[in-house]
Amino acid sequence: MDMQDRQKQPIEIAQELVLLLGGKENIAKVTHCTTRLRFELHDNHRVDLSKLEALPYVHGTFSRLGLFQVIIGSVAINHVYRSIIDLTPAFEPGIKDINNRNRRMNPLVQLAKTLSNIFVPIIPAIVASGLLMGLIGMIKVFEWVQPESPIMIMLDIFSSAAFIILPILIGFSAAKEFGGSQVLGAVIGGILTHPSLLNPSLLGYKVPQYMEVLGLDIPLIGYQGTVIPILISVFFMSKMEQALRKMVPGSLDLFFIPFLVMICIGSVSLLVIGPVSLLIGDWITMALELVYKSGGTVAGFLFGGLYSLIVVTGLHHTLHAVEMELLANPDIGVNFLLPIWSMANIAQGAAGLAVFFRTKNKRIKKIAIPSAFSAFLGIIEPVMFGVNIRLMRPFIGAAVGGAIGGAYAVFTHVVANSYGLTGIPMIAIVAPLGSYNLVNYLIGLGLSAITAFIATWILWVKESPEEQK
């Protein structure tokens, strides 16, 4: 950005974006993540794409999962988002364009979009917890503080809180997405993590109690750190709540509906959904573990090379659910997927850095450096959409680097103890698992970056005079 663009206030950026997106009446809904503003538009044809992409603070645009997405980087995105909310009318599901709605009815696409909307708001809490776990690991390794000291006790509480109440966080976020009461969603999560239920991480050390229901012995096991049970429970909770609101008089709904929902969904969650979901989660994690162990470096090569394509589609947010299941499974307890994703992210940054040295286009140079370093910190959208995909050959070079790094990460069994962090910050959740793990992670990052940089340099084609401008 030049100085004039740098001085723009969030409200001014919001006004420009809203205008070029077809006006506030064209925006049905807006959400955001770390680098992207996601718009549900009534008519995508009303977007002035050329002027929008010419804005200095816009690193790229694309349309996925029925959403028009604008990459503006992480700087002040929260303030820009709030300014857009102030400018646009409240979202009303009834005013969606029929054609847009029908175009988004593909079940797989709808599932990916739903999971993305549920997990993106939770990521900051998980990232903070992961960083705290990394800090605790370094404190223990270097013996900076005694393990029994008050500061270590507090840090341990702080770092584990988000994972203990994860079903509550997911319940709150999922209820919003499914159209139910967010508070009731949190309560359902609280039921599944109640202290009376044995934490699954303690299985093997403690034997759960059982209760007899209709002749069946149901183990009193909690669902801390799990994903599938709370997602299914809150889905049915939201549907039941919506159905009851159509039948129960308004004068009674405040008391009657929450009472019925908690009794019915709480019972079904503990007796049916929970046990069945744990079985499903075990099948998923066992399948992934089988692919990981039998596929070996080949699996890492493919996953690392193709991960960026998953990011392009927006499906990468759905992988958080899988990573949670890996961590929650007592027989696995580590995240072996995240190091592979991290290699792909670092490769995108290295490819963008190669573009900086090769291109003569001043605007691309201006975007390449900050977005490349952003990728090294785990945020790849600016460099991927703003530079690499736009030029395509750097995207291919990054895929090569990600494949090599992913293969090395699997070959050396690099794992993490959390999720949500990649690139350099991921050191915090890799280091606590040992120096061998850390050293191989750093070697993998180096291999990914160097390979992607060289591949992009070799694949580069000299720009025409028009492209240089």
Image: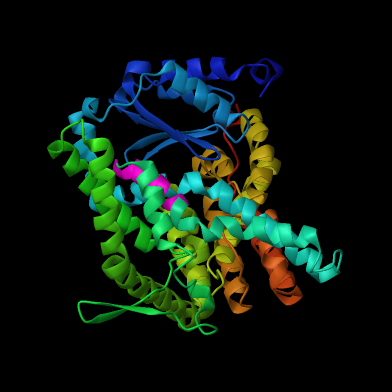
The x, y position of residue 252, in whole percent, is 21, 35
Q: In this view, does 307 lie to the left or right of 127?
A: left
Vertical order, 459 against 179 (above or below): below
Q: In this view, does 166 lie to the left or right of 437?
A: left
- Specify start and end residues of the magenta stretch as a single range: 169-179
Point 32% across, 20% down: residue: 26
Front residue of 338/216: it is: 216
Point 56% across, 63% down: residue: 338
Vertical order, 337 against 295 (above or below): above
Does residue 404 belong to the magenta stretch?
no
Does residue 173 belong to the magenta stretch?
yes
Instruction: Determine if residue 308 is in view.
Output: yes
Instruction: Count the numbered circles shown.
Output: 0
Point 20% across, 77% down: residue: 214
The x, y position of residue 229, in whole percent, is 35, 63
The x, y position of residue 197, in whole percent, is 44, 69
Q: Is residue 140 left or right of residue 450?
A: right
The quarter holding residue 22 reads top left
The x, y position of residue 105, in whole percent, is 21, 44
Front residue of 396/370: it is: 370
The quarter holding residue 425 reads bottom right
Front residue of 15/214: it is: 214
Point 72% across, 58% down: residue: 155
Q: Is residue 215 left or right of residue 227?
A: left
Q: Main secondary structure of the magenta part?
A: helix
The quarter holding residue 448 reads bottom right
